[in-house]
Image: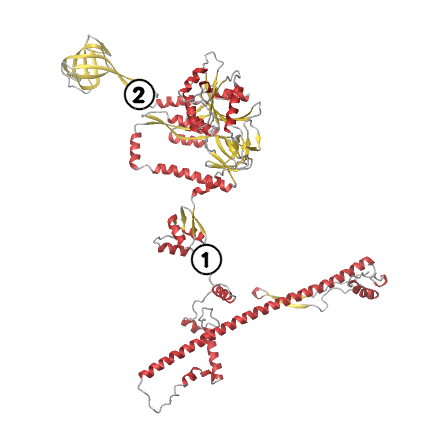
Amino acid sequence: MSDTDGKKPLGLGGKGGQVKQSFSHGRTKSVVVEKKRKRVVVPKPGAAGGTSGAAPASSGQGKSAPRPDTSRRPAGISDAEMERRLKALAAARAREVEESAAREADERAREEERQRRRDEAEAREREEREREAALRAKEAEDARVAAEAEAAKARKAEPAPAPAASPAEPAPAPDRARPAAADPRKSAKRADDDRQSRSAKPREDGGRRSGKLTLKDALSGDGGRQRSMAAIKRKQERARQKAMGQSQSREKVVRDVKLPEAIAVQELANRMAERVADVVKALMKMGVMATMNQTIDADTAELVIDEFGHRVVRVSDSDVEQVIEQVADTPEDLKSRPPIITIMGHVDHGKTSLLDAIRNANVVSGEAGGITQHIGAYQVTTESGAVLSFLDTPGHAAFTSMRARGANVTDIVVLVVAADDSVMPQTIEAINHAKAAKVPMIVAINKCDKPDADANKVRTELLQHEVVVEAMSGDVQDVEVSAKTGQGLDELLEAIALQAEILELQANPDRAAMGAVIEAQLDVGRGPVATVLVQNGTLRQGDIFVVGEQWGKVRALMNDQGERVKEAGPSVPVEVLGLNGTPEAGDVLNVVDTEAQAREIAEYRAKAAKDKRAAAGAATTLEQMMAKAKADQDVAELPVLVKADVQGSAEAIVQALEKIGNDEVRVRVLHYGVGAISDTDVGLAEASGASIIGFNVRANASARNSANQKGVELRYYSIIYDLVDDIKAAASGLLSAEVRENFIGYAQIREVFKVSGVGKVAGCLVTEGVARRSAGVRLLRDNVVIHEGTLKTLKRFKDEVKEVQSGQECGMAFENYDDIRPGDVIEIFEREEIERQLS
């Protein structure tokens, strides 16, 4: 089949035209436009009959298309192809018919809608015209009535009319009211004049001016400011609503307005959905002159809200913490949980060794100086399968707050008392902590394997502190144990299990977690790390939480063995990673729903703590500040900076250092924190002349170089009592030395000589002790001190000597003093300075 069979070539062929295009700057261009046609396949003349006959058959209802005649189709097209083409053609025709029917239906619907709108508009215009006509008729009637009344008044005022007057003469007045009905041409002219006058002037009903604005109208002021299109549209909308029977005035929406302690005027208007100008106007009526950006108090704002008819909902900043309020658990949700046992007692009584024996571990060897200086949390599974959570607290006197924290979060206190040492000060303190926390106590009498162990002495001394053990017919369990040999450990675990069974400890693991921070530290590789003891609920990886003034998302959970876990249930101690800062030991951890809530609560707590510190400083009056400054003039201070490995140790060191000192000297802790010593700490120490104390931490390379350059002293410690002793010695160096006088001799003046160039010289006899040139002297007259000073010269015969022994004569001259007489006594003494120590 050739390309020209049954087709015409596409081209202009007289079917085109020219279009002239205009551009900017007067440029034009003529373009030839071509009308394109679809390129259709036209069968050969022999196949026309078969095609026309196949088309109707293909569009018949329910009938299959007949097989096309092969002799009447174009060359190169198969039967199947021909059949497909015919079907496609029939489908296209049917689709065109459907589309045309749909278009016609749409056009009819649009025409009906347009007609309906036209009818409504005509009805509205007709109503407007009728209303205007009624108004004009009413005005004409009112004018006529008024004219008649005026005429009646005038007739009454005039003299009586002549008798020949006809009573029907006043009748032409109604005819004057309708002059337009007499002459149609005059009426048309008057209507035209009215249209022209209305076209040049704005409408009296407030609409926009229509028609031309002439120069005369503009100069006369008639073409002044007009109503905006928005105002016209609002008016039309109100008219449309009125025509449709809708309410003209909207019902006022009464809102619940949340009112904090202070609020800006603009924010108050926004919460009430009122205009700011209206709120400012209402405040002015109350006598409060405030702009939209000024802040007003809650009471004034409440009056404004009542004025506008809204409801007041008083809120405060502390309401952000309502999301962590505890909800009471139902008995069905509670499940048994492992007990939390805190081991307490005096230093070096074997608390950690006892726990090591229970855990089959060796923690003591890792502690500096063999004493516990951190609070540790461990979980132990006994042979019977019972799970126990242990807290190991330090016994040193400096760690009072750590022991108090351990007692507050515990269920059972195991009081460890050494059988050879008996009750000691920290033992008494541990008893008081347990009583304050109202938790049951189990006494473990340790070191029973020693030859000098006396368990009965321990029981007897505990009676003095109202701890009556079972052996003394009391209710406190006591067990004799030995951490070294393992004696009595099974009995101790049985006593703990029995006490836990009596307590019936339960918690709900299916709620948001809540726990207490036992210890917190700043790890170099892991960032802030908190040791948390979960008390209720289950803490899972990915939970968002708030703890004190810090918040975070649980990045990882580590158990006491250093293994990663996915979750931690009640009574399980874990290390939590993912905090944004180091919390305080003793803070409560609460899991919240969103990060925004956690951040908001943490920011509120930080702001509240800052305000509290500021308020404490602001409460001091000027007189108190002056009195304090005057009192501090004679007090020497030793400034120090403290950096420790964990929060609890830093807190304990600060408390210990604050106890050092007396009325003359004291230790001032400028700053304490957790983590390595940094350049910032060195800068602060240099500015204040302080030393930096590192407890189990070191300074980084940059901080060391900076400290060497600036002359800042760095001191490192790993045992707390070494630190306290060194600071006490340094503070003692600030004490003024004690001056003590030692009397070494007496001399009596026998004669007074005048020597030129020297002055008066006393001839003396040393009656007691020795007279020294370097010593101090006092001149006594009738046993009254009249002068105290030093010797100018001490001579024996004509020689200057350093000292003169008792029974010998000598010559003495006083420095800057000449009033000496025979018979006076010279007292000779030496001063000795003795260093003082802080007790």
Q: Residue at x 59, y 68 (%)?
A: 114
Q: Name the kind of residue labelled 2 in the image.
A: Ala
Disc 1 target residue = 252
Which of the two discs, 1 and 2, labels the residue nearer the N terminus?
1
Q: Residue at x 64, y 65 (%)?
A: 106
Helix, strand or loop at disc 2? loop
Gap between marks 1 and 2 measured at Cα: 84 Å
Disc 2 target residue = 737
Label 1: how many residues lie within 10 Å, few (<14), some (14-19) or many (20+)?
few
Residue 27: x percent and y percent? 59, 65
User: Depth check: 266 or 79 in front?
Assistant: 266
Q: Name the kind of residue labelled 1 in the image.
A: Lys
**Seen in the image, is 152 located left or right of residue 191?**
left
83 in relation to 458, above or below: below
Residue 405: x percent and y percent? 45, 29
Q: Quadrant of the N terminus?
A: bottom right
Does any portion of residue 363 appear in the rendered image?
A: no
342 in relation to 581, above or below: above
Q: How many marks?
A: 2
Helix, strand or loop at disc 1? loop
